[in-house]
Image (tube, helix red, strand yellow):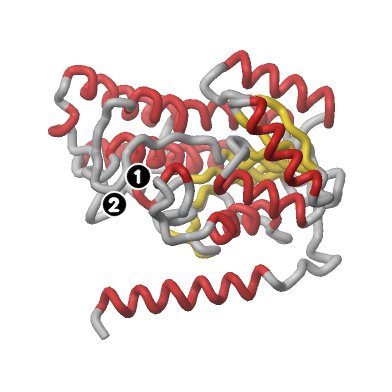
Amino acid sequence: MDKKERAKERKEKRRQEISLLRTIPYSDHQRWWSSETIAVVTGANRGIGFEIAHQLASHGVTVVLTSRETAVGEEAVKVLQEGGLNVAFHQLDILDPASIQAFSDWIKETYGGLDILINNAGVNFNFGKDNSVEYAEMVIQTNYFGTKNMIQALIPLMRPSPAGARIVSVTSRLGRLNSKRNGISNVEVRQQLEDVDKLSEEVIDNTMNTFLEQVKDGTWESGGWPHVHTDYSLSKLAVNAYTRLIARILEERPEGHKIYVNCYCPGWVKTAMTGWAGHVSPEEAADTAVWLALLPDQFVSGKFFAERREINF
């Protein structure tokens, strides 16, 4: 058996383990949440987001499903409600500051705040071996800046509790800094993003803006950026970096006011975003997000996960 076959075998074994784990119900003493617990899932009208909303609601959490388009969002909520789940809908476009503000005001007025935020909303315009940067501006603005703006807007609304509030962002292994296949080859940029003690929002923003400037002037191919799905990979790298940064900023919050922030890679999933070419089902892809959101003893923050295991950035 060669190296590739052994890796495939290990991955399949892990998938089977997780499938088994998902069948084991949480015991009463593990369940820190109730129907009063509010979870917001962005971009949840289909795919991974819909399945995250479905699984959280199935565990008894009240879920607010958001979608940019009202009609499809309302239809998605109707499907879940017909299954007896406690799910509400609100329109949200994470690219639009006014939409984020309106949503935040509604959450505060309707529920008094929230306990769980799942940042799932995102876009990708490359399939297979394509690597166009035609839509780089939209990809970076949505996947990174939109996600960041959501986190910043909702942190003040995170409700205090002994278990702590939770933020989980859907990212990708394509956004790993030191990937041999798809990492950043510009040593200076990589070092800036690696040093979590010196990492700042300005550093991450500047990195993304530098890339977008190079896209505009046609020099991006010599910028040392990832070679595969460049704009998408960078957008997820930025979310990974921001996860580490915001976790560090929030770590000094007192007990009862903790907010734990993590990100995870769902794998290559069979959804519209991959042109249905993935090999992971939405149900499997949603699992780690739900697991992180509901961890009974959540002392983990600023980490990157895949298949319920920590991986490196």
- Foreground: disc 2 or disc 1: 2
Q: What type is the residue that disc 1 sits on?
A: Glu
Residue 226, placed above or below residue 298? above
Image disc number at residue 194: 1
Q: Secondary structure at mark 1?
A: helix
Residue lying at 35% horizontally and 44% vertically, measured from the top left: 194
Q: Could you tell me residue 248's position as x and y percent?
A: 54, 41
Relative to 292, is 157 on the left or the right?
Answer: right
Residue at position x 54%, y 43% in the image: 169
Q: What crowding class fits label 2: few (fewer than 14 Cα within 10 Å), some (14-19), or many (20 or more)?
A: some
Distance between the alpha carbons at the discs numbered 2 and 1: 9 Å
Q: Residue at x 34, y 41 (%)?
A: 233
Q: Residue 178's mark?
A: 2
Q: Nearer the viewer, residue 280 or 63?
A: 280
Callout 1 environment at 10 Å: few (<14), some (14 to 19), or many (20+)? some
Q: What is the residue that sits farthest to the top in this orientation?
A: 98
Q: Is residue 153 left or right of residue 115?
A: left
Element assignment for label 2: loop
Q: Which mark is residue 296?
A: none
Q: Is residue 155 left or right of residue 195?
A: right
- Identity, as a three-letter code, of the amino acid under mark 2: Asn
Q: Nearer the viewer, residue 234 or 59?
A: 59
**Image location (x, y in percent) of residue 164:** 73, 47
Task: Tell me whether circle 2 and circle 1 mark residues in contact (CB < 8 Å).
Answer: yes
